[in-house]
Amino acid sequence: MSPRRPRRAINQINVVPYIDVMLVLLIIFMVTAPLINPGEIELPSVGQNLTSPVAPLEITIKLDRSVVLRDRAGSGEAQRVSREALLAAVRAKQDKRPEQAVVIAADKGVRYEDVVAVLDLLQRNQVRKVGLLARSST
């Protein structure tokens, strides 16, 4: 009988089978990718006669916490109002024009809490279409 050599431990991983599998998967993806049709979205068309939206009511909060109301759709005059009179004035103007939005603008130094207080006052009293006005950076 021939003496057997003892087996030596292999300290390297054979990666050739992994490379073969990767190349087969790559070929499958390259063949099937052009066959997949992306989902198409058909957007609705819009008629040419669009009505322009009504200019919003603008509520401005100054640094001294005073509130100024300006109706951009009406006279455009700014009038200083108290917070209680603000609600009545906004409701009266929205009764005339229900589609008119309300935007809140504030000086940069005004506390966030003051802006939220006016926003909360309007939302608690079911004033519709309330938003915040911001200047674009461009």
Image (cartoon, rainbow, N blue to C red):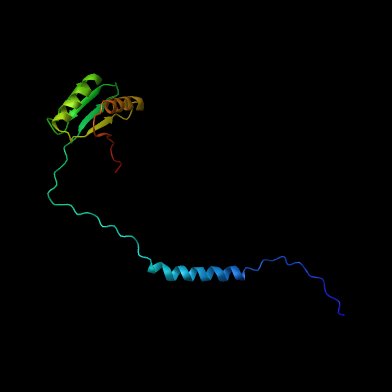
Q: On the rendered image, what quadrant is the N terminus found in?
A: bottom right
Total of numbered circles in the picture? 0
Residue 108, percent across and down? 32, 30
Q: Is 22 or 74 nearer to us in this picture?
A: 22
In this rendering, the answer to whether 55 lies above or below 45 is above
Residue 88, percent across and down? 19, 22
Q: Is residue 23 left or right of residue 44?
A: right
Toward the right, the furthest residue is 1
Q: Is residue 14 left or right of residue 42?
A: right
Residue 10, percent across and down? 73, 67
Q: Residue at x 33, y 60 (%)?
A: 39
Toward the bottom, the furthest residue is 1
Q: Is 13 or 135 nearer to us in this picture?
A: 13
Q: Is 12 or 47 nearer to us in this picture?
A: 47
Asked which quadrant contains residue 101, the reply is top left
Q: Is residue 32 left or right of residue 124?
A: right
Q: Residue at x 65, y 69 (%)?
A: 14
Q: Is residue 1 left or right of residue 47?
A: right
In this rendering, the answer to whether 97 lies above or below 17 is above
Q: Residue at x 28, y 24 (%)?
A: 121
Q: On the rendered image, what quadrant is the C terminus found in?
A: top left
In this rendering, the answer to whether 26 lies above or below 78 is below
